[in-house]
Image: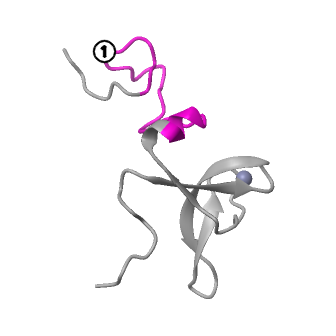
Amino acid sequence: MPTLTSAPRDASFPMADCALCGKPVLTYVALDDAGAERRICVHCDTAVAENLKWVSPGELEQAGYYFGPPPAESEKGGCSTGCGSCGVKKS
Ligand SMILES: [Zn+2]
């Protein structure tokens, strides 16, 4: 079983500064041609610097991201405010 080195817990999200977007962005892991892990900006698919900041869901929302699926006009289940945190239907 491989040893994970960077993810403290699954309640944290990796953000890093993207030079192209000019702001801290959420990142994901992709493999380059050599099979090495790279951090990629979710917005522009550019590799970002490795100085990751692991943020909580609350911090992520403060940065402008929704935690969970994005609110869709046709799929609001019981919460009419579009708050992005009411994932459970109460009906
Ligand atoms: Zn970017």
Residue 84 vs 39, above or below: the answer is above
20 and 59: which is toward the camera: 59
Where disc 1 sits, the SS reads: loop
Q: Residue at x 38, y 28 (%)?
A: 85
Determine which residue is flagged by label 1.
78
Query: Does the magenta-highlighted stretch encompass residue 11?
Result: no
**Residues drawn in magenta:** 59-84
Numbered marks: total: 1
Label 1 amino acid?
A: Gly
Q: Residue at x 73, y 55 (%)?
A: 18
Residue 50 percent location from the top left of the image? 64, 69
Q: Residue at x 56, y 85 (%)?
A: 35
The quadrant of the picture occupied by the N terminus is bottom left
Q: Is residue 19 left or right of residue 49?
A: right
The quadrant of the picture occupied by the C terminus is top left
Q: Is residue 18 left or right of residue 68?
A: right
Query: Does the magenta-highlighted stretch encompass residue 69?
Result: yes
Residue 71 percent location from the top left of the image? 47, 27
Q: Is residue 51 left or right of residue 72?
A: right
Asked where in the image residue 89 lies, by quadrant, the reply is top left
Q: Residue furthest bottom?
A: 34
